[in-house]
Amino acid sequence: MKHTKVKDLLNSTTTLQEVNAKGWVRTFRNNQFIALNDGSTINNIQCVVDFENTPEEILKRITTGAAVSVIGTLVESKGAGQKYEIQVNKLEILGDSDAEKFPMQPKKHSLEFLRENAHLRVRTNAFGAIMRVRSVLSFAVHKYFQEKGFVYVNTPIITGADAEGAGEMFQVTSLPLDNLPKTEEGAIDFKKDFFGKHTNLTVSGQLEGETFAMALGQIYTFGPTFRAENSNTSRHLAEFWMIEPEVAFNNLDDNMDLAEDFIQYVIKYTLDNCQDDLKFLEGRLLEEEKSKPQAERSEMALLEKLNFVLENNFKRVSYTEAIDILRDSTPNKKKKFQYIINEWGADLQSEHERYLVEKHFKCPVILFDYPANIKAFYMRLNDNTEPGRETVRAMDILFPGIGEIVGGSEREERYDVLIEKMKALEIDEEELYWYLDTRRFGSATHAGFGLGFERLVLFVTGMTNIRDVIPFPRTPGSAEF
């Protein structure tokens, strides 16, 4: 008999039908009531066992974590909080779970403990909900861009280019580390490596994406990216997923419009399709915040916060205006900021970004026109900027609780200007000849942005540590599983 998902059973419109459900035991009470979950929904279905006619050795094997199959009649439940239950006629243990050793007991576990058991934590309500929300958000990303006529491009994971110029990249090599081949000058001879050159794991698909946008018009990438940044904060991962659209003929204003529309679309889609999971995560967040001082609690509940982003236009503010606001702010004057803002040109920190969003404007903010010297080489230099205060057509989107969630720009499409910027930063023109070709042959205004997918999942789920919204987090000193 083919089994039916728990979600479909709970949404059934008919009863008194024989059904088969398979899943994992969450709890087993009074030798009679199994709470069965199969991952299709956060809700369990109650399976009522005829314990008087079930062998004792079978009842003993119905433990938390055990995989079981039940066949029985779907009936309206007499218990509170559930519409249907299964009166079990036949029960089979598919996989035993030692109750003494199974880590995911039906009790509250710390997030640190669950991270240590990332291969099993998805069996808890919280992580089941987070991963279903992540899945729906991921689908919404593709749905949005496909509906808008974007072409999905798979950019390389192994690359010889450093898009950010940051240098914090994971090297890829097949050379024997205990006997590295050397050149006559004593440097590592990468010509003997697998690719015949120095290569790394990508930090961004943007540069390669630009080449495709200049032929296909509008493209997006959605894939894994890597940063060898020795950071143990709650906002950083060494391996994460990036969404990067790139659009020919778009300027910075078009780019801001696209990013705002995109974010609102995927959040609305997830709100519409993950109601049970989001309600659970909202309750979890409220419970967690009870132990925090009032000043540290969220001003809005999770669903209210998500609807707030949908219902409010993002405030667009120049970097220069933002610096003036921050310099004159109370926390800056009273030296409450960890990084005091004294002058134009400072690189904004998360505390500054969150102040602008949460305290000053009280809505999502798009900052634009940043100082050129704190932004990447490929961002378009603004015309008519005063010497010493050159700015680029960059934009960052700032969200409550998160800070920066999107970074993007209009790209520098002028060949001569791009060459000058690369020379100033000592970026090898020969290494990026293919990128420069897009400026040599049919160059045009174009723009794009990058959105760290895990930061979006963090915002939508209300979680506070980015390690809790990716299946297997990769961080300094930790590459378990």
Image: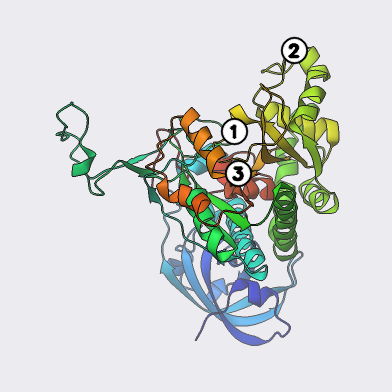
Q: Secondary structure at mark 1?
A: loop
The label shown at residue 108 is 3
Q: On screen, 89 above or below 355?
A: below
Please tell me whether residue 326 is drawn above or below residue 135 in the rendered image: above
Query: Mark 3–mark 1 contact, CB under 8 Å?
Result: no
Q: CA distance from mark 3 to mark 2?
A: 39 Å
The residue lying at 79 percent from left, 49 percent from top is: 309
Instruction: Name the foreground residue: 274 vs 243.
Output: 243
Pointer 2 or 1: first along the chain: 2
* Camera-side mark, 3 or 1: 1
* Of callouts 3 and 1, the N-terminal one: 3
Which amino acid is tagged 3?
A: Lys
To which residue does mark 1 refer? 375
- Residue type for callout 2: Lys
Spot occupied by residue 20 in the image (x, y as percentages of width and height): 55, 80
Q: Position of residue 463 (x, y in %)?
A: 65, 43
Mark 3–mark 1 distance (CA, rounded to whole Å): 44 Å
48 vs 427, left or right, is right
